[in-house]
Image (tube, grey):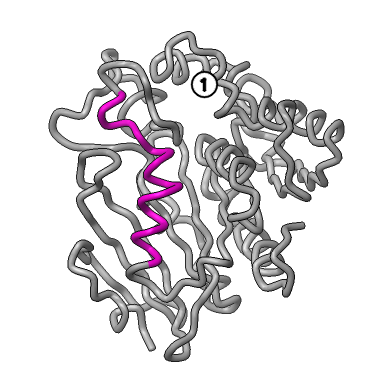
Amino acid sequence: MSEQAVLEQPQVERVSAHRSHGGTQGVYRHSSVATGTDMTFSVFVPDFTPGAKLPVVYYLSGLTCTHANVTEKGGFRRACAELGLILVAPDTSPRGEGVPDDPAAAYDFGLGAGFYVDATEAPYAANYRMWTYVTEELPALIAANFPVDMMRQSIMGHSMGGHGALTIGLSFPQRFKAISAFSPIVAPSLVPWGHKAFSGYFGTDASAWRRHDAVALIEDGARVPGLLVDQGAADEFLETQLRPDLLAAACDSAGIDLELNLRAGYDHSYYFISTFMAAHLRWHAERLNRPSAGQA
């Protein structure tokens, strides 16, 4: 059975659908209550037996991206079809007329840079509610419209999206059975990208900063059995923005099993991500398909 047979709910508009690797790659649009805007997301659904429920992986993209970057360049469909995984890729921020942007039109704040938080500062608080969108509204929409087993969810992401995947996964350890990231911003409170974003979205509320910082969450007691991170050794942002060494130290102190792979010669791009995407999806599938509800 294809995805087209299950998309029946009127609140979701199909923008496009294409057959690929024994499944259907769709792009969808809906009116979001969380952001007060239309939101677009993509979903790949492998062909499935009628009545079956499949595990779902959420992929969160990085700065300047939309759902389209991983959908078009991520190279995930063959592996998802072989492993029986649904992959959902939301946008990175609200968009549309009246949505506030960075006054200087910089790439690292505002449109395309929602940082997967619920902003509390004006003028961003009304629309920049990506935490609520990704953790509440989108999963409910996916559950209502696609053949997903909501007891088998996992999350992954890249760069800013790696930050989102880590913080969301650490905050909901019973929900997400596997958490992985490519080149994540692991300690946004300590690097320029995070300083700019958190100051703009939260002001000087340090407690809000810590709730959206993976290293701080672990320091404050968040626990999961394991994490998978791949990082390009030739990434231009490695030392200034990403700092995987800080995550390694935090996980070591907390007893979290971190598999951190430093990949020689690889940069921050989708050439890197697509190279190791299938390995990440296999890692997710192993955990999503375990009989126990625990993560490892």
Number of numbered callouts drawn: 1
Residue 154 lies, in percent from the top left, at: 58, 58
Q: Nearer the viewer, residue 266 or 182?
A: 182
Q: Is residue 108 left or right of residue 218?
A: left
Q: Is residue 95 left or right of residue 245?
A: left
Residue under the point 27% across and 38% down: 35
Give amino acid for label 1.
Ala
Q: Where's the C terminus, which quadrant?
A: bottom right
Q: Is residue 17 above or below residue 50?
A: above
Residue 207 lies, in percent from the top left, at: 56, 18
Q: Nearer the viewer, residue 151 or 62?
A: 151
Q: Secondary structure at mark 1?
A: helix
Q: Nearer the viewer, residue 173 or 260?
A: 173
Q: Is residue 245 left or right of residue 140?
A: right
Q: Where's the N terminus, which quadrant?
A: bottom left
Residue 180: within the magenta? no
Residue 31 lies, in percent from the top left, at: 20, 50
**Which contiguous range is marked in magenta?**
125-143
Q: Residues within 10 Å of mark 1 (few under 14, many from 20)?
A: some
Residue under the point 65% across and 62% down: 284
Residue 292 lies, in percent from the top left, at: 74, 69
Residue under the point 40% across and 41% down: 132
The residue beneath circle 1 is 208
Residue 141: within the magenta? yes
Q: Is residue 174 above or below residue 279?
A: above
